[in-house]
Image: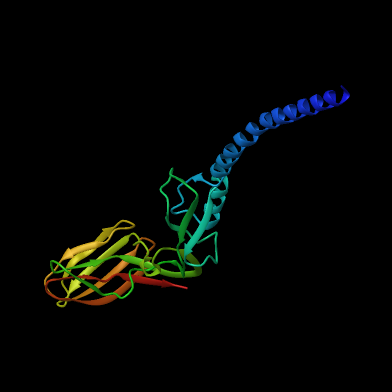
Amino acid sequence: MRAKYVVAVRQSLRWWLAFLALVGIPPLTLTAPSTAAAASAHSSCRAPRMIGLTVTAARARAKISGCQLRLTGASVKMPKIQTIRTQSARPGRVTKFLALSVNPLCPGSVQLGPPPGEPLLSPGPTGLDTGLFIEGGAFIFRSAPVCKDLVGKSDAGTITVTNAGGTAIANEVALNAGQLLKITLSAGQYTITGVFASGNAVGPTMVTVPAGEVVRQDLVLDVP
């Protein structure tokens, strides 16, 4: 009788253990997908707008958005100056990581002059484009996709253009800041002079205008 009782108790224990095991399985099965979903959500972000920001600002914005960054392009030497040119994901798009291309450092003066290589010729109605530029000053770094494309803006003042015979084709024409004097001319040789709004005179500069070409020749005041 005692033996039968022991067997019954053991069978009851087995059933209870089996029941408890079945009850314990579902929570483990349910938590695995939720954990994976949380990890997936943590590894993605909604891309913020980065183009035009400095590397320092882009890193700060990425940290707030939870984005992992991959920097390409120019090597980062001055993150507070170098800017972002492109980003791999459009702003607002969900992505796991964000690749940013970095613009290079461009050394130069505080005052940027006109485009390099003047006089510059381009096909078109025979004519002259000219402006007033101040170039020089302290040495600084800028950031741009192409350093040679960095040029200054013309200053306010007046410009006079005379032909080879000394006749004024354009006499003390007033220009606002950022404005160029654009005039149609006959092919030939001309002299350009100018006066900045500050009173500083510049020139004379000689320029030859070929037929069928637009010549870009600016007046430049160099400053230390």
Q: Please state which of residues 43 and 85 is positioned toward the viewer in this rendering.
A: 43
Q: Residue furthest right?
A: 2
Q: Nearer the viewer, residue 58 or 159?
A: 58
Q: Residue at x 55, y 67 (%)?
A: 77
Up/down of 61 relative to 179, above or below: above
State whether residue 34 is above or below residue 137.
above
Q: Position of residue 113 (x, y in %)?
A: 37, 68
**51 left or right, relative to 118:** right
Which one is nearer the viewer's eye here, 62 or 80? 62
**Horizontal and vertical percent position of residue 202:** 33, 71
Residue 1: percent from left, percent from top: 87, 21
**How was this image coloured?**
rainbow
The residue nearer to you, when weighing 205 against 113, is: 113
Question: Residue at position x 66%, y 30% from top?
Answer: 22
Q: How many marks?
A: 0
Image position of 151 with respect to 8: above or below = below
- Residue at 58% over, 44% down: 39
Q: Position of residue 55 (x, y in %)?
A: 52, 57
Please indicate whether residue 104 sits to the left or right of residue 189 in the image: right
Quarter of the image holding residue 19? top right
